[in-house]
Image (tube, rainbow, N blue to C red):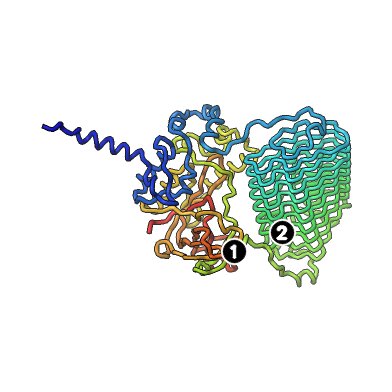
């Protein structure tokens, strides 16, 4: 008699276990599928989770799988729960989990004589606290300093204090960086003579944060130039607090400052306070910027014979806000000239509160060819103010005398526009059409998801993230964390359902909740063709080109991957072959989404500047950028 076969339940259990451990569609999935994955990893665990939640046997896209946590199973399973324990193991976690963490303590050059370590060419991440104190004539040059870094942190506190006749130059400083922080507190305090130059400073950076506190305070006869500062930077913040306080004969020039930047904020608090004979020039400041915001609070207060010039300030910018509170308050003989100020492409707002107030009658404030709109003048100096060729359509300024010539030339040519191809109309999505394609590169620093069981141990609030990752809240990264949390906590717009996903599992859960479990996720295949003209090949409407609902997810800046996901109603989603215009070679496969209902969008949205029309009048289409994604019901 033949031997009996093993009991069926044992075989079934073994096969089932093996099937669960193997990632679904891991082999033979084609170019868009995931490669074979070690079953004992956080990545494999997520893929099994995806298969249970979305059981439609579709390949897992490589762009999504590449973002999954690389943590080995043992590292993920043994990770401690209390936040101090997580903080203690942070260096190992950062390297094993591919997170965005500070690089640690920077090298200190404290106590070195000026010039002892320079020139600083190709240098990065250093602490120049108390560097060059009491130094004599000479120069320090920082060239190609901290380029292409993630979370660069440089400290120049009390740099060059009480020095004499010493120059410093910052050229190509922190260029192309991600989340860069620079601290210039009490820099060159009490110094005599010499000059400083910031040329091509923080160009094309993402989320720069520079602090100039008590910079050049009590200095004598120093000159400082900010030329091409934060050019084409994105979402940054610069603070000038107590800058030049109690200084004598200081000359500060801001030329091409923040030009073509995106959502840059600059604060000038107690700038030039009690200074003597200070001269500040803002020429070509914030030109063609997008939503710049500048605050001048107690600027030049108590100063003597200070002269400020704002020439071609915020020209051709989009929206933006300026606030001048207690500007030159209590000063003696203050002079300010606003020439061709506020000639923005799209109206912003400017508030002058307590400007030039005080008992001193020697001020001279001159608004020449001032083209501001939406302005408020409250508590303004009653004398010494001259408005020439002032153009303003707001009700507050209506009582001011405006020359007939200025009133007749009220319309301005609007130059500011988003990058070509960033927004387009649905009718352009046809085979054979030639069109510009924006730069769709993912400009966020590289990071991976945390496994959900680790991400849930870290409270989603700034103080907890600061504690775990050692990110001070007053740095660029700390402010980015706070901004991400605030955006996630914001109430949804009308018709929007939103959720911030702190893990890959959260994204899948939200997409299933909104669209059901038979869904597909898509993103543009690569960045090929971006920044130039392209030609469209075959164009296919998803779900037969019907109006549908999608879930779009956009990266947020955080130490680990966090996505802002929202369910978007009334859209059409398209796939398109992208071809080179000169050879018709297929170079990319794009995904585009068209928003059919724009009635709740802001009238100042860049789409309407680019395409014309108003909210609710036109549909707006855009490509899905690298790093972002959109989910739809499967065809």
Foreground residue among 542 and 517 = 542
Q: Is residue 537 left or right of residue 367?
A: left
Q: Is residue 563 left or right of residue 159?
A: left
Q: Position of residue 211 (x, y in %)?
A: 72, 41
* Other residues around mark 1 within 10 Å, as few (<14) / some (14–19) / many (≥20): some
Q: Position of residue 589 (x, y in %)?
A: 49, 58
- The residue wearing badge 1 is 533
241 versus 493 height, above or below: above
Foreground residue among 52 and 392 = 52
Q: Residue at x 82, y 47 (%)?
A: 252
Q: Residue at x 56, y 39 (%)?
A: 559
Q: Can residue 603 be seen by looking at this rendering?
A: no
The kind of secondary structure element at disc 2 is strand
Foreground residue among 172 and 218 = 172
- The residue wearing badge 2 is 375
The kind of secondary structure element at disc 1 is strand
Foreground residue among 539 and 599 = 539
């Amino acid at each position: 008699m033949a031997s009996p076969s093993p009991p069926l339940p044992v075989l079934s259990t073994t096969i089932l276990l093996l099937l669960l451990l193997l990632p679904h569609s891991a082999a033979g999935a084609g170019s868009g599928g995931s490669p074979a994955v070690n079953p004992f990893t956080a990545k494999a665990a997520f893929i099994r989770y995806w298969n249970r939640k979305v059981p439609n046997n579709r390949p897992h896209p490589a762009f999504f799988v590449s973002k999954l946590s690389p943590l080995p199973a043992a590292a993920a399973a043994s990770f401690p729960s209390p936040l101090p324990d997580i903080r203690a193991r942070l260096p190992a976690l950062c390297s094993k989990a591919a997170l965005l963490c500070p690089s640690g303590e920077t090298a200190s050059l404290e106590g070195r004589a000026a010039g002892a370590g320079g020139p600083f060419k190709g240098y990065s991440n250093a602490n120049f606290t108390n560097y060059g104190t009491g130094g004599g004539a000479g120069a320090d040059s920082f060239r190609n300093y901290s380029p292409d870094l993630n979370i660069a942190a440089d400290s120049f506190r009390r740099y060059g204090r009480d020095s004499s006749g010493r120059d410093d130059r910052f050229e190509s400083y922190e260029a192309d960086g991600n989340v860069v922080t620079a601290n210039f507190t009490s820099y060159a305090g009490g110094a005599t003579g010499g000059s400083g130059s910031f040329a091509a400073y923080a160009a094309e950076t993402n989320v720069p944060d520079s602090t100039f506190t008590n910079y050049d305070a009590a200095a004598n006869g120093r000159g400082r130039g900010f030329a091409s500062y934060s050019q084409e930077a994105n979402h940054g913040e610069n603070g000038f607090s107590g800058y030049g306080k109690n200084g004598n004969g200081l000359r500060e020039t801001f030329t091409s400052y923040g030009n073509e930047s995106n959502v840059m904020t600059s604060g000038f608090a107690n700038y030039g306070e009690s200074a003597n004979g200070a001269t500040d020039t803002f020429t070509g400041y914030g030109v063609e910027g997008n939503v710049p915001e500048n605050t001048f609070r107690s600027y030049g207060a108590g100063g003597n014979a200070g002269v400020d010039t704002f020439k071609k300030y915020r020209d051709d910018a989009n929206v933006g806000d300026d606030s001048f509170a207690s500007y030159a308050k209590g000063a003696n003989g203050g002079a300010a000239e606003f020439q061709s100020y506020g000639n923005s492409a799209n109206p912003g707002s400017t508030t002058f509160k307590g400007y030039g107030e005080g008992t001193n009658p020697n001020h001279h404030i001159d608004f020449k060819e001032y083209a501001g709109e939406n302005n408020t003048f409250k508590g303004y100096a009653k004398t010494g103010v001259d408005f020439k060729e002032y153009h303003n359509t707001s009700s507050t300024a209506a009582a001011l005398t405006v020359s007939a010539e200025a009133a007749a030339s009220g319309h301005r040519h609007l130059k500011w526009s988003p990058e070509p191809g960033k927004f387009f109309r649905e009718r352009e999505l046809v085979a054979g059409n030639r069109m510009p394609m924006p730069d769709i590169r993912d400009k966020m620093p590289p990071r991976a998801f945390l496994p959900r069981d680790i991400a849930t141990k870290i409270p989603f609030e700034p103080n907890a993230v600061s504690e775990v990752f050692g990110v001070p809240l007053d740095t660029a990264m700390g402010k980015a964390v706070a901004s991400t949390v605030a955006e996630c906590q914001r109430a949804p717009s009308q018709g929007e359902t939103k959720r911030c996903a702190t893990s890959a599992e959260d994204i899948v859960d939200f997409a299933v909740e909104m669209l059901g479990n038979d869904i597909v996720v898509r993103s543009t295949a690569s960045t090929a063709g971006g920044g130039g003209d392209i030609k469209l090949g075959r164009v296919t409407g998803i779900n037969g080109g019907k109006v549908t609902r999608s879930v779009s997810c956009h990266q947020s800046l955080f130490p680990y991957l966090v996505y802002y996901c929202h369910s978007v109603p009334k859209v059409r989603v398209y796939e398109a072959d992208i071809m080179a215009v000169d050879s018709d070679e297929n170079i990319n496969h794009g995904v585009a989404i068209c928003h059919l209902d724009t009635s709740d969008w802001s009238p100042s949205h860049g789409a309407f500047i680019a395409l014309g029309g108003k909210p609710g009048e036109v549909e707006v289409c855009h490509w899905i950028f690298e790093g972002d994604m959109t989910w739809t019901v499967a065809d």
